[in-house]
Image (cartoon, rainbow, N blue to C red):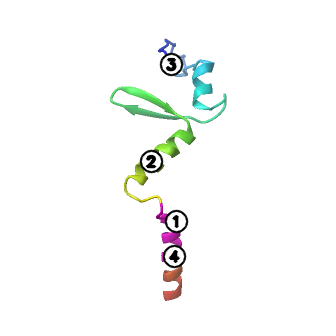
Amino acid sequence: MQEIKTTLGIEGTITLPIAYYQKLGVQPGDELILRLETGEIRILSPQSAIKRAQALIRQYVPEEQSLSDELIQERREQAQDE
């Protein structure tokens, strides 16, 4: 996708072109995540941020391992000990 110029509004608003928010899979009124990285603003949809976090975790946790199942098991064991 090509670069565009936009103007910063008086209240700090930025207007995204329709093609950009369609590509992100969001609509007007949806929440977005803004990240400031090395002098750049990155805009992510919540779904995109979740996918990035999952990919980061998968570097350390194998696909077949379920952290939630492990946590539930630990809680059950703790409850039995009480």
Q: Name the residue under label 3.
A: 1
Q: Which residue is drawn at 48% across and 71% down?
A: 70
**Which of the two marks, 4 or 2, is nearer to us in this view?**
2
Q: Is residue 35 magenta?
A: no
First along the sequence among labels 3 and 4: 3
Checking the image for residue 55, the label placed there is 2
Question: Of marks 2 and 1, which one's residue comes earlier in the chain?
Answer: 2
Image location (x, y in percent) of residue 48:
53, 39
- Give the amino acid at mark 3: Met
Name the spot of residue 35 as percent of width and height, x first.
44, 34
Horizontal and vertical percent for residue 65?
A: 46, 64
Q: Can residue 82 be seen in this view?
A: no
Query: Which residue is most to the bottom?
Result: 81
Furthest residue to the left? Answer: 38
Spatial CA span between label 3 and label 1: 38 Å
Name which residue lies at 47% across and 50% down. Answer: 54
Q: Which of marks 4 and 2 is nearer the N terminus?
A: 2
71 on left or right of 59: right
Residue labelled with disc 1:
68
Badge 3 element: loop
Q: What amino acid is found at the position of numbered circle 4 in the picture?
A: Gln
Asked whether residue 29 is in view, the answer is: yes
Instruction: Specify the segment rendered in magenta.
Output: 64-74
The alpha-carbon separation of the residues under discs 2 and 1 comes to: 16 Å
- Mark 3 and mark 2 in contact (Cβ < 8 Å)? no
Structural distance between the alpha carbons of marks 1 and 4: 9 Å
Disc on res. 73? 4
Q: Position of residue 76 (x, y in %)?
A: 53, 80
Secondary structure at badge 4 equals helix
